[in-house]
Image (spheres, rainbow, N blue to C red):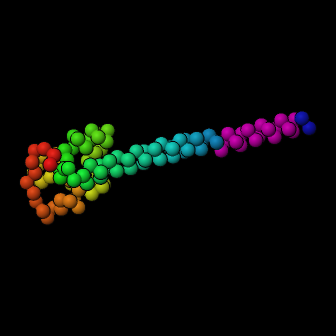
Amino acid sequence: MESSTSGFIGLAGVLVGAIVTPAVPFVGSLIVNRAAARSERTRKDLLLKMLRSDKHSWRRLTTLSSVIGSSEEVTKELLLQIGARASENGKALWALIERHPLSEIHDVADTEQ
């Protein structure tokens, strides 16, 4: 009886290990992905708040990047995802398309307006 109990416990351990081992990386990546999604949502919300502010019509890319703590490349990607665009004059200024549609071409100053 004792050897069959030991065998059962050993088999159960093997089965649990076979199930748990592949699940650990999956659960870990799920947690990381959720954290990244929350962080991205927070950054997008901050960008929207800044671009909807009545104080500034356009915002510098360096300012936006600094506030959300991302590189300029990541910031540009997030800006495009939230419906923003760069200025037509080649300066690193951004605004929401809803506030500055491409059909309305404006002269943009060197600094945030």
- Residue at figure coordinates x 34%, y 50% from the top left: 45
- Please give left or right for residue 36 compared with residue 14 in the image: left
Q: Main secondary structure of the magenta part?
A: helix
- Please give left or right for residue 26 compared with residue 100 in the image: right
Residue 78 in view of the camera:
no
Q: Quadrant of residue 74?
A: top left
Nearer to us in this view, 106 or 23? 106
Q: Residue furthest front?
A: 55
- Residue at figure coordinates x 23%, y 56% from the top left: 96
Q: Residue furthest left?
A: 107
- Does 14 lie within the magenta span? yes
Q: Position of residue 46 (x, y in %)?
A: 32, 47
Q: What are the residue bounds of the magenta stretch? A: 3-19
Q: Position of residue 10 (x, y in %)?
A: 77, 37
- Does 5 lie within the magenta span? yes
Q: Residue furthest right?
A: 1
| In the image, residue 86 above or below residue 20 | below
Quarter occupied by the N terminus = top right
